[in-house]
Image (tube, rainbow, N blue to C red):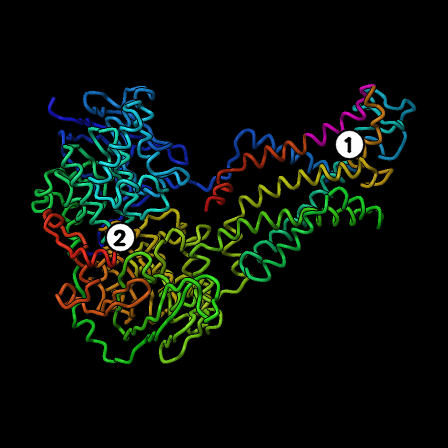
């Protein structure tokens, strides 16, 4: 018996090597395009809006959709199209900033907790559990009421609110990976924690973590809209979509476009993110079943 | 009709992740006569289980019977409707799974589950079914046949559970029973009892069977005919005697050859002149659970084990599951800090915890894990897997590192083309070679091999053992080789240490294995290893006292 015995190769040599496919399916493409649309709008809004955001351009408040004002006007007679487009900046920008902050912090801490174990794990887990027990809207209300509403405050507040969830999620995934032999192998090679979490753990939990990031982004958008609806978010004359719903809520009874379109904007953004993460390319999703 | 089962030109296709359809069974035909046991043997992925399942008209998710016919007692399972198939399952064809533990519902009593088939098919009143079940328990030589049915699955041992799942299969008095590797997960001493019980009950009832296994020696004991499969095709089929003694096909001969290990020649071991011990383990104690008042852990998996490994020599550790052999490797490697005793490696005392050991100590003592699937990071390419220890221990970068990776791949006989592949894109044997190459990358003096061939097919495992020997000749390594498989240990080790229940029973050389002055437990263990001889099981006599003392059947 020699080693020349051919071992079965899982893929026949003749078969073409499958290209690393970052291919989306149709629904995924739709989700991605809507998301990209809003992202682009958020960047270019100041150059494409037809009217300045704070300017009263029409004496007809809560006006209908016309050729001049495509999406009608709001309760003060300001152009809704301009305000929705500019609102994308706030809604998408603030949410993205805070969710990125929350997830990077949460995931890093989660992995550290899983890899270190022991008292550090207990300390982090219990502390973040305790934070989790504070109702998010109430926390937001208290902080914004106490220090006033500004963009950094909003971003940080919402980041703090979503760190515990992200931590729990990442820790649960990382604990499973941590017990695998390859992590043990790296550990007895003498590797330190930063290498373990970045090189051994992170690549194997990336798929679910990205999906979680998407979901949490949606939560953030909704929380921001909620805070703005209560008047604690973006302050006038600027407005994110949630604030616009609040401003124009009086028009709901008349079916004014002023209240409908901000809602549509929130809905399209959140639904498209959901569609996207449900239909992530196989290549990314595969990472989860390591 | 003369044949009970007629499989003609059976084809099964499967859908891959990429959406391609591949044929995994490529036109297989064979017959089973009433009362005959046919074994399907082959390596993993050869389609043996897939074929066995088609006897029930069942395919695993993603698979589809795409051609041919499977006639069982006159009915073609391929063309039956799902409802008709359900009628047949349990009454004509029954199934004994590999893992009985996973097949039983932990929250219902054994009796309820065993007689479930009679209830579903309305075969007989429950009282009658229970009486029949007790008879079957007795026939399968289960202890306390009258009361064992009242227990829950976790209250009986693995070997008993496997026999109970046979009772579950037999209660509907089927014509054919499918055994899907029923003894693979069992210890050798337990396997004997289970095999005996199966054989007796099948012979008495004149029931036909399909026995799926990768172990030719086990199959030789129970089967009348053997069908050798590879890559979804029949390589050879014939009576057991014919296959064992007059095998025609080269692949069958390879399978047979893997059973006759070439022992390490004494000259090879004698070439090493430096006889200072490399590793000395003195009264090692280790375990799991909270530390008790006496400073020892709650569950002591190792109770004072001492051993020594000399330079250029190999020590084999053999024992059944739960004897502490893996814990021994983990304690030596420092993954599980020891609670007592001492480890001296290369003249220096090793600290209990790997975190407190110096990089040099970690480098010279490497461990290779059993399952290459979990030991290789699926997110990394082979190049990265092998490159990391090179950078970490030797500071190699860029071109020097690439060259060394190529050398390592060459050493383990892998083509250079695999370096960009990920572990999931390699076969089991290839993965284990990469796993081993990673340990070699550190330039170790001692490699702890923890069941490294257990997850591999016989032929592939034999090739890995040859590779290990060859590398030892070239690099002057030592191995601490842990296995439950005596033939593997005999093939590579200069000395064999037998373990039982966390203790060292005795230390032997391969030459003295099987001699009458072995420790009773060693004798029991060695005599329980199946031999290729078909009469082995029937002629085997074991001291019942000994069996009672050492087996948790």
Instruction: Tell me where residue A13 appears, x and y as whole percent.
Output: 31, 43
User: In this picture, which residue range is highlighted in magenta?
Assistant: A254-267
Residue B187: assigned label: 2
Is residue A261 magenta-colored? Answer: yes
Q: Is residue B11 visible?
A: no
Q: Which residue is mark 1?
A: A84
Identify the chain of the residue marked 1, using the numbered disc in the image.
A
- Residue A162, image x, y percentages: 68, 46
Circle 1 packing at 10 Å, graded few (<14), some (14-19), many (20+), is many
Taking A267 as reference, is A212 left or right?
A: left
Helix, strand or loop: magenta stretch: helix
- Report whether mark 2 lies on the same chain as mark 1: no
Image-quadrant location for residue B108? top left
Can residue A271 be seen in the rendering of this structure? Answer: yes
Q: Report the residue that reaches farthest toward the right.
A: A59
The chain identifier of the residue carrying mark 2 reads B
2 and 1 marks in contact (CB < 8 Å): no
């Amino acid at each position: 018996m020699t080693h020349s015995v051919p071992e079965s190769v899982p893929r026949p040599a003749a078969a073409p090597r499958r290209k690393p496919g970052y291919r989306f399916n149709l629904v995924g493409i739709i989700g991605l395009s809507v998301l990209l649309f809003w992202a682009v709008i958020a960047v270019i809004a100041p150059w494409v809006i037809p009217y300045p955001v704070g300017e009263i351009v029409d004496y007809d408040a809560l006006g209908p959709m016309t050729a001049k004002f495509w999406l009608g006007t709001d309760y003060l007679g300001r152009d809704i199209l301009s305000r929705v487009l500019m609102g994308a900046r706030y809604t998408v920008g603030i949410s993205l900033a805070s969710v990125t902050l929350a997830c990077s912090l949460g995931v890093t801490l989660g992995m550290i907790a899983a890899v270190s174990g022991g008292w550090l794990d207990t300390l982090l887990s219990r502390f973040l559990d305790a934070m989790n027990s504070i109702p998010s809207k109430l926390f937001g209300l208290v902080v914004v009421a106490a220090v006033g509403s500004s963009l950094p405050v909003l971003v940080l507040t919402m980041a703090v609110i979503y760190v515990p969830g992200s931590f729990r999620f990442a820790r649960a995934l990382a604990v499973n990976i941590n017990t695998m032999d390859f992590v043990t192998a790296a550990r007895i090679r003498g590797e330190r924690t930063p290498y373990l979490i970045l090189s051994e753990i992170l690549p194997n939990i990336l798929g679910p973590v990205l999906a979680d990031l998407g979901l949490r982004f949606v939560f953030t958008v909704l929380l921001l809209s909620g805070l703005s609806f209560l008047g604690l978010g973006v302050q006038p004359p600027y407005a994110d979509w949630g604030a616009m719903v609040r401003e124009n809520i009086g028009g709901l009874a008349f079916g004014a476009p002023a209240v409908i379109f901000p809602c549509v904007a929130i809905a399209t953004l959140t639904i498209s993110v959901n569609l996207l993460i449900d239909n992530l390319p196989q290549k990314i999703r595969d990472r989860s079943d390591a | 009709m003369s044949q009970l089962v007629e499989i003609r030109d059976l084809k099964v296709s499967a859908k891959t992740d990429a959406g391609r359809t591949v044929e995994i069974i490529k036109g297989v035909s064979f017959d089973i006569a009433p009362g005959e046991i046919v074994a399907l043997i082959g390596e993993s992925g050869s389609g043996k289980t897939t074929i066995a399942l088609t006897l029930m008209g069942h395919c695993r998710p993603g698979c589809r019977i795409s051609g041919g016919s499977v006639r069982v007692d006159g009915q073609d399972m391929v063309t039956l409707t799902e409802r008709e198939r359900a009628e047949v399952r349990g009454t004509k064809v029954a199934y004994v799974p590999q893992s009985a533990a996973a097949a039983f519902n932990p929250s219902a009593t054994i009796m309820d589950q065993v007689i479930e088939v009679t209830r579903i098919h309305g075969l007989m009143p429950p009282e009658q079914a229970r009486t029949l079940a007790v008879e079957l328990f007795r026939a399968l030589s289960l202890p306390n046949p009258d009361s064992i049915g009242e227990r829950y699955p976790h209250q009986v041992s693995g070997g008993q559970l496997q026999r109970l799942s046979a009772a579950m299969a037999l209660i509907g008095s089927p014509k054919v029973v499918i055994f899907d590797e029923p003894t693979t997960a069992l210890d050798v001493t337990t396997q004997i009892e289970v095999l005996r019980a199966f054989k007796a009950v099948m012979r008495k009832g004149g029931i036909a069977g399909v026995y799926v296994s990768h172990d030719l020696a086990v199959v030789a004991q129970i089967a009348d005919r053997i069908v050798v499969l590879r890559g979804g095709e029949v390589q050879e089929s014939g009576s057991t005697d014919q296959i064992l003694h007059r095998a025609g096909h080269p692949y069958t001969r390879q399978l047979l050859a893997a059973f006759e290990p070439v022992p390490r020649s004494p000259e090879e071991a004698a070439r090493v002149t430096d006889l200072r011990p490399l590793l000395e383990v003195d009264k090692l104690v280790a375990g799991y659970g909270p530390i008790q008042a006496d400073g020892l852990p709650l569950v002591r998996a190792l109770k004072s084990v001492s051993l020594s490994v000399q330079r250029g020599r190999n020590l084999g550790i053999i024992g059944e599951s739960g004897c502490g052999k893996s814990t021994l490797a983990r304690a030596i490697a420092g993954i599980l800090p020891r609670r007592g005793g001492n480890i001296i490696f290369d003249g220096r005392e090793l600290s209990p915890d790997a975190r407190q050991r110096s990089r040099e100590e970690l480098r010279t003592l490497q461990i290779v894990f059993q399952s290459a699937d979990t030991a290789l990071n699926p997110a990394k390419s082979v190049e990265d897997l092998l490159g990391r220890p090179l950078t970490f221990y030797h500071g190699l970068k860029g071109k020097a590192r690439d060259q060394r990776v190529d050398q390592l791949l060459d050493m383990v006989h892998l083509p250079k083309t695999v370096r960009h592949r990920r572990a999931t894109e390699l076969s089991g044997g290839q993965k284990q070679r990469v796993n081993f190459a990673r340990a070699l990358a550190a330039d170790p003096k001692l490699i702890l091999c923890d069941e490294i061939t257990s997850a591999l097919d016989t032929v592939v495992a034999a090739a890995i053992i040859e590779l290990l020997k060859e590398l030892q000749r070239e690099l002057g390594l030592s191995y601490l080789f842990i296995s439950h498989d005596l033939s593997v240990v005999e093939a590579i080790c200069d000395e064999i240490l037998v373990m039982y229940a966390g203790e060292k029973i005795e230390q032997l050389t391969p030459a003295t294995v099987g001699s009458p002055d072995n420790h009773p437990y060693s004798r029991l263990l060695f005599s329980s290893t199946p031999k290729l001889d078909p009469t082995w099981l029937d002629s085997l006599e074991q001291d019942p006292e000994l069996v009672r003392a050492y087996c948790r059947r």
